[in-house]
């Protein structure tokens, strides 16, 4: 099963994701309200593994743990994710524990779940610079390390037409 988070508008979603997704995939788009992570660490202390904010994104850690592949489809914003995709990614904090471990000489959070996921990111947008692509590559690599992903891929699409060709 794949967990697919995207910021595509409804017509774009229908045109592309309908062929991309299988019936077992979970798709999260911009419908519904999402509250911003406030950094309270309640997902570690008060309700371990579950965000204390009351919205439909409070179980993002569990949803991430249930998938085999985590797919992000985001407009490129200066080499980073769009605000919506970034917000959903922030809400996956319950996926990790508040304890630390060292990987590659860097400090990272320990994993709450034993299962490793694949991490796939599709950035789209016209006129992405080389610096933005390089920043995005580094960002996704760091996110993959933090998520303890088994591997990751980053793709860049100048237009939604080229994005739609990915299946």
Image (spheres, rainbow, N blue to C red):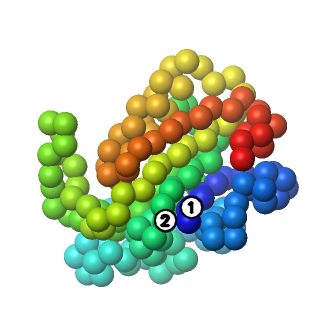
Depth check, front residue: 16 or 48: 16
Q: Distance between the residues labelled 1 and 2?
A: 5 Å
**Is residue 9 visible in this depiction of the protein?**
no
Asked which quadrant contains residue 152, the reply is: top left
Q: As drawn, is 3 to the left or to the right of 137?
A: right
Q: As drawn, is 19 to the left or to the right of 70?
A: right
Provide the residue designation for mark 1.
2
Compared with 15, 161 (above or below) is: above
Whether pointer 1 and pointer 2 mark residues with C-beta atoms closer than 8 Å, the reply is: yes
**Image quadrant in which the N terminus is located:** bottom right
Badge 2 marks a residue whose secondary structure is: loop
Question: Which residue is pictured at 47% across the width and 49% down the height?
Answer: 119
Provide the residue designation for mark 2.
67
Depth check, front residue: 18 or 76: 18
Mark found first going from the N terminus, 1 or 2: 1
Q: Position of residue 46 (x, y in %)?
A: 26, 81
Q: As drawn, is 125 to the left or to the right of 11?
A: left
Question: Which residue is pictured at 25% across the width and 72% down the height?
Answer: 44
Dot 1 crowding, Cα within 10 Å, few <14, some 14–19, many 20+: many
């Amino acid at each position: 099963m794949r967990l697919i988070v995207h910021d595509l508008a409804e017509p774009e979603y229908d045109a592309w994701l309908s062929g991309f997704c299988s019936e077992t995939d979970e798709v999260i788009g911009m419908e519904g309200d999402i509250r911003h992570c406030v950094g309270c660490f309640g997902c570690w202390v008060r309700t371990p593994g579950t965000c204390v904010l009351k919205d439909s994104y409070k179980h993002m850690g569990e949803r991430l743990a249930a998938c085999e592949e985590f797919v992000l489809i985001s407009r490129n914003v200066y080499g980073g994710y769009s605000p919506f995709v970034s917000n959903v990614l922030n809400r996956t904090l319950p996926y990790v524990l508040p304890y630390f471990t060292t990987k590659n000489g860097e400090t990272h959070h320990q994993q709450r779940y034993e299962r490793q996921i694949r991490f796939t990111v599709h950035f789209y947008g016209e006129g992405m610079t080389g610096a933005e692509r390089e920043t995005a590559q580094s960002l996704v690599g760091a996110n993959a390390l933090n998520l303890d992903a088994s591997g990751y891929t980053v793709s860049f699409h100048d237009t939604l037409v080229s994005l739609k060709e990915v299946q």
